[in-house]
Structure formats: structure tokens, C-alpha cells
Image (cartoon, grey):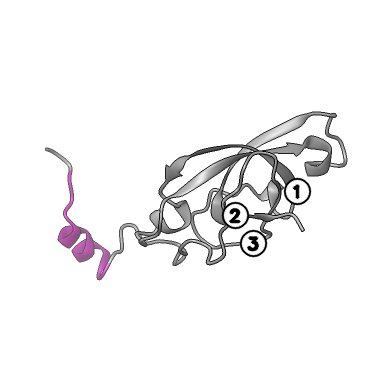
């Protein structure tokens, strides 16, 4: 191969340690209080702002929806993206009313989002 630079060569050229890929935040494991949901459950997306890699779209934080279905468990991204061990989690197809997500201009429509279990709680 041509044009490759080793870590040692890079550090020598940079004048010291040169981290190539460091996480921007520590990440986190699964939520301590998780609930198994079933279709028809009314849920609320936790309003949490987590530094680092997450798969929770900002526009659903704190919003209410209805579980439509459950998918198989996958690696939990808040941990997996940072090399932290965590249980795999199912995702739920959660249906939201567009007017509740975007009250200032959404049409009367439904929005479906795949949401990891740790991001949800039962709607009180």
C-alpha cells in the first residue's frame, strides 16, 4: 500500500500524541427502569439530552405516542457507539400525530419512529 502513515509517524510529525478517534462523550448504558411495551400502549419519550451517540431524534423528546409494534433486540446505540457493554434492546414502532410534533405547520398526518426501549416510559 502507498501513502499510509503509521501512528508513530503521525505523532512524530505532529510533535506528540495524536488521538485518531476518541469518543466525544462517555456514552451510557441501558436505562435502569425499562418497561416491556405492547401494541396499543400509550408512551412518552423521555426528555433526556445525552452527550454522544444516540438514536433518539430531538423532535420526539418529551412527546406522547402509541406503540404499534416491537422489533427484535439490537445493540443499544448509546453504549455500543462508545464501546460500553449494554443489553441489546428492542425498538418499538411508535406512532405520533404530526400536529403534536410540529404544532406550527404540520398537516394532519401520522409519523412513525423506531424508538429504543430505554427512551420510552408509560404515559401517566
Quarter of the image with the C terminus is bottom right
Mark 2, residue position: 119
Name which of mark 2 and mark 1 comes first in the sequence. Answer: 1
Among all residues in the image, which is located at the extreme bottom? 16
Q: Is the residue marked by circle 1 packed among few (<14), some (14-19), or many (20+) residues within 10 Å? A: many
Residue 48 lies, in percent from the top left, at 64, 62
Query: Where residue 53 sits: x, y (%)?
Result: 49, 54
Q: How many marks?
A: 3
Between 42 and 74, the residue placed more toward the observer is 42
Q: Residue at x 31, y 63 (%)?
A: 19
Nearer the observer, disc 3 or disc 1?
A: 1
The residue identified by callout 3 is 48
Q: Is residue 13 magenta?
A: yes
Task: Residue 57: say if magenta.
Answer: no
Placement of 114 over or under 124, stated as above or below: above
Above or below, 47 relative to 101 = below
Q: Which residues are magenta?
A: 4-17
> Mark 1 sits on what residue?
64
Q: Residue at x 69, y 59 (%)?
A: 47
Can you tell which of label 2 and label 3 is closer to the viewer? 2
Q: Quadrant of residue 22?
A: bottom left
Label 2 – label 3 distance at C-alpha: 8 Å
Residue 22 or 5: which is nearer the viewer? 22
Query: Could you tell me which secondary element the residue under label 1 belongs to?
Result: strand
Amino acid at each position: 500500500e502507498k501513502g499510509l502513515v503509521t501512528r508513530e509517524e503521525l505523532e512524530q510529525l505532529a510533535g506528540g500524541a495524536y488521538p485518531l478517534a476518541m469518543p466525544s462523550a462517555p456514552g451510557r448504558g441501558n436505562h435502569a427502569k425499562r418497561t416491556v411495551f405492547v401494541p396499543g400502549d400509550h408512551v412518552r419519550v423521555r426528555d433526556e439530552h445525552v452527550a454522544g451517540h444516540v438514536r433518539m431524534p430531538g423532535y420526539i423528546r418529551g412527546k406522547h405516542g402509541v406503540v404499534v409494534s416491537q422489533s427484535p433486540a439490537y445493540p443499544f446505540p448509546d453504549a455500543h457507539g462508545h464501546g460500553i457493554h449494554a443489553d441489546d434492546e428492542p425498538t418499538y414502532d411508535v406512532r405520533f400525530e404530526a400536529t403534536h410534533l410540529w404544532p406550527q405547520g404540520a398537516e394532519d398526518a401520522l409519523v412513525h419512529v423506531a424508538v429504543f426501549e430505554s427512551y420510552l416510559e408509560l404515559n401517566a
